[in-house]
Amino acid sequence: MSKTVQRLETKESIDERTQRVLRGIIEGYITSNEPVGSRSLSKTLEMGLSPATIRNIMSDLSDMGFLMQLHTSAGRIPTDKAYRFYVDQVVVANQLTRKLQKRIQEATQEGGMNQVEDLLISTTRLLAGLTQFVCLTSSPRVETSILRRIEFIRLSSQQILVVLVTRNGQVRNKIIATTEDLSQDFLNTVSSFLNEQFHNRSLHKIRQQILESMVEDKERYDRLLAQAVRLGKKAFELEVAPEVYIEGQHNLIFSERFKNLNSARGLMDAFEHKSMIMHLLDSTVEADGIQIYIGIENELESFQDCTMVKAQYSDQNNILGTIGVIGPTNMDYQIVIPVVDFTARILSQTITQQSSFCD
Amino acid sequence: MSKTVQRLETKESIDERTQRVLRGIIEGYITSNEPVGSRSLSKTLEMGLSPATIRNIMSDLSDMGFLMQLHTSAGRIPTDKAYRFYVDQVVVANQLTRKLQKRIQEATQEGGMNQVEDLLISTTRLLAGLTQFVCLTSSPRVETSILRRIEFIRLSSQQILVVLVTRNGQVRNKIIATTEDLSQDFLNTVSSFLNEQFHNRSLHKIRQQILESMVEDKERYDRLLAQAVRLGKKAFELEVAPEVYIEGQHNLIFSERFKNLNSARGLMDAFEHKSMIMHLLDSTVEADGIQIYIGIENELESFQDCTMVKAQYSDQNNILGTIGVIGPTNMDYQIVIPVVDFTARILSQTITQQSSFCD
DNA sequence: TATTAGCACTATCAGCTGATGAGTGCTAAT
DNA sequence: ATTAGCACTCATCAGCTGATAGTGCTAATA
């Protein structure tokens, strides 16, 4: 595992003309996926510079660490540092075409998606389809979500189904075992007690409170309360399975774009470790907006040939999760960045709408 | 789409020696994944036959349609017909090693899997890992499963959560919208009515009955009954999303075994069409035991370079779904067949245990 | 002084070559 | 019926070729 690179900032100031050349090379490589040479660049740039001059500039840019060659006589390709420069300096907040906006909106508004899970899956698939890359989405952490409703349903003398609904519309089920046979009436009392007690609190907080009250009231004689606490404890112990949705893995193998990526295998393997991916998605210091990790800026070694573009989605109050794509470093940032950004916004909007149905 | 081939039966009787040669070629190709020639076969067979004799036999086998050559001078490989012969005549019910049996049993008995869904996913993953192929599993069709419990939970004045538990432990949630504000008490009455009315019937049947009673009792005045029927209708309209779990797709790309498969892409694309896969898995006439589709015996064109080995799993009463793997036609049948068989059995057993907790 | 034309150098790629080897089919001998 | 022997076929591979596209350097130029 290599040392973590925070961000490839550029200290030196680069003169206008050099910048234009650099930009030309980057965009050339993005569109063609081929190393760009001085001759062709001299034509496309239309700056009236001869290939020789361009070569000199290119040489400077190589010295500054913006360009590299796969071999002599191969034309140059941008380094991660160059992409960082490009993203920071050149890519401006771009408007998506109306058509694309429509497409994203429609896809998220499809019917039958009252469960957040379905919405997330279909959005993930959408983004993978639009970008032709791999799309990763982390589901809202059940931990921090707000309790809307908890209910116990007696299945048999030994089994109780816990249904837990969160503010943002996630529904979690769990079957718990009991030693004692509890009647449905009793369970109803317990659940209305818990609902009253813990309404609008985060699951995390609730769990804490339950544990505390267990310590406090060890010698509680009220049967209802005792059982409520006991059942509550089990119910809120719902293991916080790291939920990550991954779509578009086949793009990784069949897309032309990924062909010169030295280890698609490594990426695939990484995707198997959901909890690691979860961590990667959610470990963002910056609270808002879009985050971009280019090449070696990525913490994970197998991601270091790629760029990850991600953004948080939220309801009106809290950040819920992250949606992002991972693609080659020479992805079309001008498109990908606004697409991810817009998709995250629409996702937030849709989820907010849903949770606003609460009374 | 090519004409459906039912099964590649062999009419001719083949003499003992020829059979042994054929078997040798098949097993040779299975282990080496290379066309097998007369010389090497003469050695490994240890029948005291010279390469020339073997060549004559091979020539006969080619005429009978059991062998083919990719090009002259390449050695021969078995045809689909040969594999069919091999599977029918040669592969005997094989015992798995204790070690493998243990491994499968342990994997399915892991904790925290009281939901059938989790069990199915982890079993699918297990089988993909064991075989190094792609594993496909269809979940029990909610349609035909037996109602154990239905419950309505009032979320807001406009939203009701339906929780539906089936006999085999599947839990389905759906949020439905209402125009009228219904109290939780009322909902409880409705659900206990429905539970009583429809206990132990299949969802399919229940839906039918509800529709019938709507026709019959158009002018029903009983508010409870009317609402119960209306809510029931919505609840049992749960769209029967074809649930298929697919694991091990990466094997398709990286495994040596698949490398000479002309279209991994086609397979990947096919996997995207879950409902088609679902159909493929569940469309089996034969009720019991293991089913094997070799090469062109597969209905789906993109599967016709592969072999699919599948088996149904069930609870004590009914077939619930199918689990199977898809791999190259020269897979190691001696291993794969018993592994799939055993896994399906263990899966049935585990699910049966779970649903037996019902009172 | 910045730019450019010219030239030598170099890596890659497609296409060709001949050698090699694995495998077959046929025929004649056993 | 089996087998040894031989001619033949074909795929693969290493090595060579010329064409191409790129560079770096130097000297001439505006």
Image (tube, coloured by chain):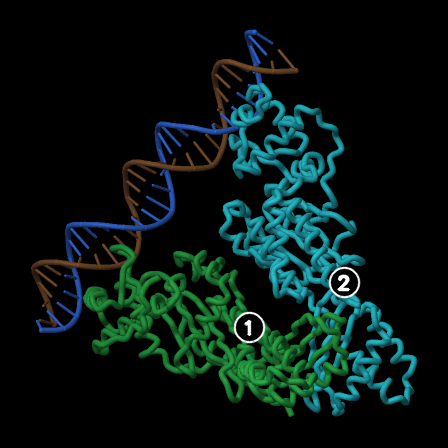
Chain colours: A green, B cyan, C blue, D brown
Q: Mark 2 Cα within 10 Å, few/some/many (few <14, many 20+)?
A: few
How many marks are shown on the rendered structure? 2
Q: Is residue B145 left or right of residue B98?
A: right
Instruction: Residue A18 in the image: state x and y as whole percent.
Output: 23, 73
Q: Is residue B199 left or right of residue A96?
A: right
Instruction: Residue B135 in the image: state x and y as whole percent.
Output: 61, 54
**Above or below, B323 relative to B61:** below
**Above or below, B313 relative to B39:** below
Instruction: Residue A55 in the image: state x and y as whole percent.
Output: 21, 64
Task: Give the quarter of the image for residue B323.
Answer: bottom right
**Mark seen at residue A240:** 1
In the rendered view of the protein, which quadrant contains the C terminus of chain B?
A: bottom right
**Above or below, A210 relative to A238:** below
Q: Is residue A260 left or right of residue A208?
A: left
Which secondary structure, mark 1? loop
- Along the line of sight, the residue nearer the viewer: B156 or B215: B156
Report the Cα–Cα distance between label 2 and label 1.
28 Å
Q: Extreme front residue here?
A: A219
Instruction: Residue A82 in the image: state x and y as whole percent.
Output: 30, 70
Residue at x 36%, y 70% (from the top left corner): A294
Residue B163 visible here: yes
Residue A44 visible here: no
Residue at x 56%, y 19% (from the top left corner): B50
**Above or below, B186 relative to B48:** below
**Same chain for the residues at labels 2 and 1, yes or no?**
no
- Along the line of sight, the residue nearer the viewer: B119 or B232: B119
- Name the kind of residue labelled 1 in the image: Val
The residue that mark 2 highlights is B356
